[in-house]
Image (cartoon, rainbow, N blue to C red):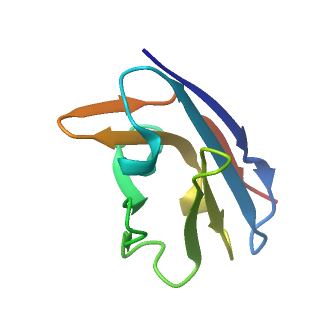
Amino acid sequence: QVQFVESGGGLVQPGESTTLSCAPSGIGFHFTTSTLGWYRQAPGEQREFVASITDSNTKTYADSVKGRCTISRDNDKRAVFLVLNNLAPADTAVYYCFVLWSPDNFWGQGTQVTVSS
């Protein structure tokens, strides 16, 4: 089983930034060799990829956040972080942390980010 401790997000003003944190733990995966990242799901929309970081620190971003998003990981703290800058209402969604330790994929419970004035 994998447990997730997620934090960050909440209500944010347009143009501001937010930082999401995710600390997965438990048996069933190996943190340092896992790919980590986030998907998001807006109301009435499908879940979409946001960003990922591999065990070798290769980072991938969705076009919708490229240039204003930074993903990082801290293997000592066993945590992954997502910084989103210049937020817009279109970024409003539930953000889901994931762990990919092939072939298994684990999901966090989600963190709400609402961008509104």
Where residue 87 sits, quadrant-wise, is bottom right
Q: Position of residue 76 (x, y in %)?
A: 64, 50
* Residue occupying the point 69% across, 48% down: 114
**Is residue 113 in view?**
yes
Q: Is residue 112 left or right of residue 56?
A: right
Assign the C terminus to one quadrant of the image.
bottom right
The answer to whether 68 is drawn above or below residue 76 in the figure is below
Q: Position of residue 55 (x, y in %)?
A: 38, 59
* Residue occupying the point 64% across, 67% down: 84
* Residue occupying the point 46% across, 79% down: 66
- Name, please, the residue furthest toward the left: 103
Q: Position of residue 99 (x, y in %)?
A: 39, 40
* Residue occupying the point 34% across, 51% down: 48
Assign the N terminus to one quadrant of the image.
top left
Q: Position of residue 115 (x, y in %)?
A: 70, 56
Q: Is residue 8 left or right of residue 40?
A: right
The answer to whether 117 is drawn above or below residue 86 in the figure is above
- Name, please, the residue furthest toward the bottom: 67
Where residue 53 sits, quadrant-wise, is bottom left
Residue 55 versus residue 52: which sits nearer the camera? 55
